[in-house]
Amino acid sequence: MKIKQKSIITFLLLLFIIPLGFYTKFYSGPAHQWVNNSLGGAFYEVFWILLVFLILPDSKPFNIASIVFLATCILEFLQLWHPAFLELIRSDFIGRTVLGNSFNPGDFLYYLGGSFAGFIIIKSIKNRNG
């Protein structure tokens, strides 16, 4: 598959994952607290992996997934730090969505699962023939 086709597929997946990820913040059905506070972390990982892959399509899927996982783990630990500039960023919806606002060690499992899913997705795109 040509780079252009891979980019189109990746872009379309991003168009799907972005609203799905935001939807987890507004979902109010069964298990809403879990969906609102935890499941979105997996979609967050997939989003960043797809975005990096869109920008750097020749990168190895494992490298992309590993770097995204490491970066989001660092962001999780940053939630323990509350300087004024970070609190200002976290004061609106997008800032809270990107940086988070409370440390939860359980989130690492969702980051790991999302990174694995993102790895499988972009590996499948890269290896697709036709």
Image (cartoon, rainbow, N blue to C red):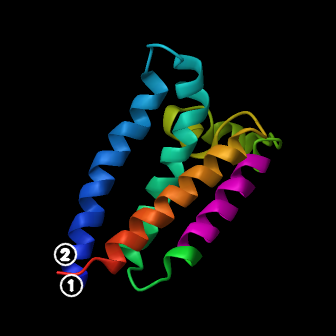
Q: Looking at the picture, does residue 126 appear above or below residue 43?
A: below
> Which residue type does callout 1 highlight?
Lys
Q: Give the image quarter of residue 84.
A: top right
Amino acid type, mark 2: Gln
| Residue most extreme to the top | 29
- For this rendering, which residue is in front, 63 or 19? 63
Q: In the rendered view, tell whether residue 32 sits above or below residue 127.
A: above
Residue under numbered circle 2: 5
Residue 69 among magenta residues: yes
Taking the spot 56% from the left edge, 58% from the top edge, the residue there is 115
Q: Residue at x 49, y 75 (%)?
A: 61
The magenta segment? 64-77
Residue 20, given in percent of the width and then of the height, sits at 37, 38
Say what secondary structure mark 1 lies in: loop
The chief SS type of the magenta part is helix
**In this image, 60 relative to 23: left or right?**
right
**Residue, disc 1:** 2
Where residue 95 appears, as percent x and y from the top left, is 56, 41
Discs 1, 2 touching: Cβ within 8 Å: yes
